[in-house]
Each structure stands twice: as structure tokens, then as C-alpha cells.
Amino acid sequence: MRRITGAILPVLVVVGVIVAIWYAAAYNMNRAWTLDQAERRALEITASDVFTDTMWQERPRLPAPHQVAIELWNTTAGEPMLRERRGELRPNPRSLWFHAFQTLAPTLLGFVIGTLAGMLLAVSIVHNRAMDMSVMPWAIASQTIPILAIAPIVIVVLNAVGLVGLVPKSLISAYLSFFPVVVGMVKGLRSPGAMDLDLLRTYSASRAETFWKLRLPASVPFLFASLKVGIAAALVGTIVAELPTGARFGLGARLLTGSYYGQTIQIWSALFMAAICAAVLVMILGAIERATLKRMGLDR
């Protein structure tokens, strides 16, 4: 019990400090609009009135934490994913779960594509000096190009060849997720020491046997660390990909419509839903990592 309290208490303290700073920032950023409206209507308002108004504005510059929490509750627990329309069950665009599902589908597909591409590239780099000298610099250089510049180009090109919907968003998601996998996997495959490699040589082990029995098991902890970064990057890639396509559904579309109509509460709730999705995905990967390492006898 004491251990649990010791682990939770620091987290609660940090969250409390962040929420307090958030409330103070919301008051300061929304206060000017409240005073301006009072001046226009020739109203005399007290400090308490100013504080109350800054906490409940319909379109605040910075929504208060409780406004975002209420919006999250109303658009998740308060709205079904499907609603009946003209005798049919159709997706409910008011449900944040529905938008999250629309974003998670291409995220997971892109993550799988990026992970497989990254692992294959890492194996090639470790076993082929030409690949190491030629491909690795390009892989690093590719990440210096802003995804916001690439996404519209990819969308337009793929639309021209008839690929729309899930695939373009997945490819952009894969573009962001493959690099952490490449870097982590290369480091993991090269992590065995010279003594371990020499030991396998004394047993006349082939390169394939060295790979399967030494390099690959040694790379697993590095791989999982990279996958956690990659899944979060894949989610960001999908959200960015939804912006230039003018998508109607998805967290990116939710952010876009919120910015069009000045609905900052909607924008912040979509951002929090994206963060919740990323946290859940990382937690799932963490559980798989613990189970895998435990089975391999590498758990700590």
C-alpha cells in the first residue's frame, strides 16, 4: 500500500500543478474578452463575475480543464458511435469514439507497414556494408523533411492513381513510424559483444544461426522501445494526413472543423482523445513487451 501511494502521489502532484497552471492561463487569456464585452454593454462586473465568465465562455481562447472534461464526456459517454437515420444505423459524427476509430484504423495499418519495413531495412543495414553506407544516411535525411510538406504531395499523387481513404493515410503513418524502428533495431542487432560473436564462430555458427540465436534475441528490448515511439509517431502521421485531405471523419478532421468554426473546446477534446489513444497503444505494447521479455527470461 505504501509502495502504491508512493508511486501515485508524485503523479497526482504533477497533475495538480499542471491543472492549476492551466486554470491560471485560461483566466488570463480569456479575461480580456470578458472585460471587453462588459465595456461594450456598459456593465459593472466584479472580480468574481470576471472569473466565472472566463471559466465558462462558449468560445474561449483557452478552455478551462473542466470545459474540456465535460466536452470529452458528452462526446464519448453521451453519444453512441452509431445512430439511426432513415431506418439505418449510420456512424454518428458527434461521437469522439467514432472519430478515434477512424484515425486508429490507418494508424495501426501504417504502424504494421512501418514496423515491417523498418525491421527489414535494419537487418539489411547490419548485414550489408553497402546498405549501411548508402541507405542509413538517406533514412536519417528523410526525417528532416517536415511531414506537413510531404503529406499533401503523397495524398495528391496517390489520389491521381486511384488510391484514396485508408491507404494514403496509412503510408504517411508508416513514413513516421519506420525510422524509430530502424534506429532501434540496428542498435539492438549490433548490441552483442565481440566475445559473444567469437563464441558462436568457435561453434562454426553460420550468419543465419548467429542472427536467429544471438542478434535477434538481443535486439528485442531495443525493438520494443522503438515500437513505443513508432506507434505514437504513427498516430501523429495519421492525424496530419487527415488535414490536407479534407477528411470528414477522424481526429484530424475534428481538429480541422474546430479551427474553422473557432470551437477551441472541440479542438482540445480531440487533442486529449488523441493523447488517450496514444497512451493506450503504448500501454498495450508495454504489456506485450513484459510478456515477451518474461518468456525470454529477460524481464527485470
Image: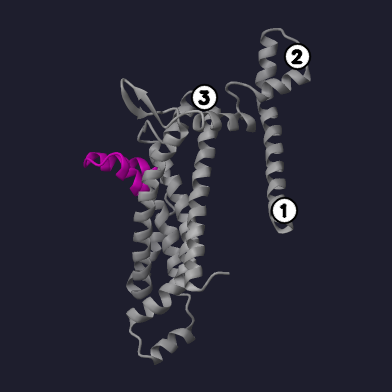
Instruction: From the top left corner, tell me how far across and down residue 221 is, in percent.
Output: 49, 67
Marks 3 and 1: in contact by CB < 8 Å? no
Q: Is residue 146 visible?
A: no
Instruction: From the top left corner, tell me how far across and down residue 298 is, in percent.
Output: 52, 72
Q: Which residue is mark 1?
A: 5
Dot 2: element: loop
Q: Is residue 208 left or right of residue 264?
A: left
Q: Which residue is mark 3?
A: 262
Dot 3: element: loop
- Residue at the limit of the structure toward the top, as seen here: 42
> Magenta segment range?
149-172
The answer for how far apart the CA atoms under marks 3 and 2 are is 26 Å
- Compared to 182, does 60 lie above or below? above
The answer for how far apart the CA atoms under marks 1 and 3 are is 41 Å
Mark 1: give few (<14), some (14-19) or many (20+) Cα within 10 Å: few
Q: Residue at position x 43%, y 41% from top?
A: 239
Q: Quadrant of the C terminus?
A: bottom right
Q: Which residue is mark 2?
A: 45
Mark carried by residue 127: none
Instruction: From the top left corner, tell me how far across and down residue 223 is, in percent.
Output: 45, 64
Amino acid at dot 2: Ile
The answer for how far apart the CA atoms under marks 1 and 2 are is 44 Å
Between discs 1 and 2, the one toward the N terminus? 1
